[in-house]
Amino acid sequence: MTTARVLIADDQEMVRAGFRMLLESQPDIDVVGEAGDGQAAVDLTRRRRPDVVLMDVRMPVLDGIAATEQLMADPSVRARVLVLTTFDLDEYVYGALRAGASGFLLKDAPPEQLIAGIHTVAAGDALLAPSITKRVIQTFASLPARPQPATELEQLTAREREVLQLLAQGLSNAEIASQLVITETTTKTHVARVLAKLGIRDRVHAVIYAYEGGLVVPGSSDARP
């Protein structure tokens, strides 16, 4: 059993206490610290080296999005950020994702969803609340393309480009495997290679990359040449 090291960042002491009580009841989660503001979260993350930072959005000194951006820009930081907020607002979702967060959940999510989310993010996968996922994809699909350097996409094989296109449509590994008539294990391998070649952290950021880079045309599943 792999233990996930977690740091809790929230400006409300009672909220932090509640999260700590819940997480410490789990045999495979270790709470390594608490922070009451974004700057403290950055400093503690660098010292305690958690696997996951539970990051509130609205905090003093430095907000959660700015704190996430600082952490993700630091090559010495290996932690992944799971953003928790009471505000289901697009600006926070997009700000957190652009800053490099690997997950986004509302604070009223069931405890089992939070615990599962921590393990999902700690394992290197991305997590979005189900109510948010489709809207994120639709919004990024409507944005003007900002082409990525051609050399990055040229690293991908034709099959890997197909996989990236399907990721951008929000398909799961099983759905991608079914559509391409390959095994789910092979799909996982392709996904891992796409992320590695493009230097992308997880599936959610692959969606952002595909749309912003113009690989997927809004309103169409066809790849650009």
Image (cartoon, rainbow, N blue to C red):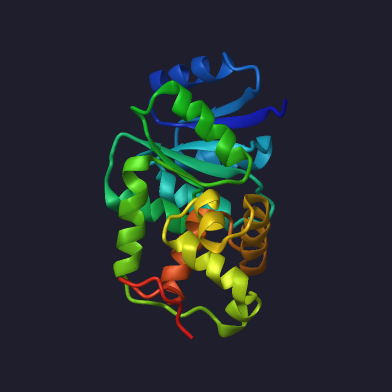
Query: At 67% from the left edge and 51% from the top edge, which residue is drawn?
Result: 185
Q: Position of residue 36 (x, y in %)?
A: 45, 31
Residue 63 higher or lower than 219, as above or below:
above
Query: At 59% from the left edge and 33% from the top edge, which residue is drawn?
Result: 119
Q: Nearer the viewer, residue 166 or 149?
A: 166
Q: Is residue 100 visible?
A: no
Q: Residue furthest front?
A: 181
Q: Nearer the viewer, residue 69 or 19?
A: 19
Q: Residue furthest right?
A: 1
Q: Nearer the viewer, residue 33 or 152?
A: 152
Q: Is residue 68 visible?
A: yes
Query: At 49% from the left edge and 49% from the top edge, which residue is drawn?
Result: 101
Residue 222 higher or lower than 99, as above or below:
below
Please indicate whether residue 202 sits to the left or right of residue 46 in the image: left
Q: Nearer the viewer, residue 160 or 88?
A: 160
Q: Position of residue 205 (x, y in %)?
A: 50, 59
Count of number-bearing discs: 0
Residue 89 higher or lower than 139, as above or below:
above
Query: At 47% from the left edge and 29% from the top edge, which residue is drawn?
Result: 114
Q: Position of residue 99 (x, y in %)?
A: 46, 56
Q: Position of residue 92 (x, y in %)?
A: 33, 49
